[in-house]
Amino acid sequence: MCVAAGVDAGVFGPLKELSKFFIVMAMAAIGLNTDLLKMVRTGGKAIVMGFVCWVAIAGVSLGMQHFIGIW
C-alpha cells in the first residue's frame, strides 16, 4: 500500500506499461513522419545537429541512471 496516496502499489504496474507503450507510439509517429530524402537534400547540418542532440540526451540519461543507481 502506498502510504502517501493511500493507493495500492499494484495499480501503478499497468499504468507504467501503458506509459511505455504511449512513448513508443509517439516516437514511432515522429519517425514515420520524417522525410529522410528531404532532410538529406537540405544539407548535412540538420542530420549532424540531430545526431549531436541524440548523443547529448543519451549521455545525460545514462549519466542520471548511473548517478541514481539504476544502471
Image (cartoon, helix red, strand yellow):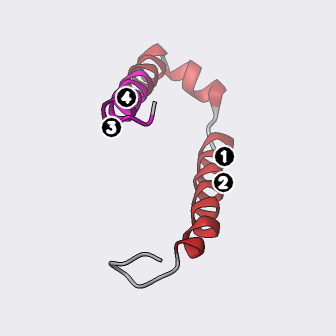
User: Badge 2 local density, few (<14 within 10 Å), some, or many (20+)?
Assistant: few
Name the residue located 42 percent from the left edge and 75 percent from the top edge: 2
Kindly report the distance in space between the C-alpha atoms of the residues bearing marks 1 and 3.
28 Å
Kindly report the distance in space between the C-alpha atoms of the residues bearing marks 2 and 3.
27 Å
Kindly report the distance in space between the C-alpha atoms of the residues bearing marks 4 and 1.
27 Å
Return the residue at label 2.
Answer: 25
Which dot, 4 or 1, sits closer to the camera? 4
Which dot, 2 or 3, sits closer to the camera? 3
Kindly report the distance in space between the C-alpha atoms of the residues bearing marks 3 and 4.
6 Å
User: Badge 1 local density, few (<14 within 10 Å), some, or many (20+)?
Assistant: few
Q: Which mark is residue 28?
A: 1
Q: Which amino acid is tagged 1?
A: Ala
Closest to the observer, 64 or 21? 64
Name the residue located 32 percent from the left edge and 78 percent from the top edge: 4
The boundaries of the magenta stretch are 55-70
Q: Is residue 60 left or right of residue 19?
A: left
User: Above or below — where is 9 with respect to 63?
Assistant: below
Q: In the figure, residue 5 lies in which quadrant?
A: bottom left
State yes or no: discs 3 and 4 in contact (Cβ < 8 Å). Answer: yes
* Most common secondary structure along the magenta stretch: helix
Q: Which mark is residue 66?
A: 4
Considering the numbered disc 1 on the image, is that residue within a helix, a strand or a loop?
helix
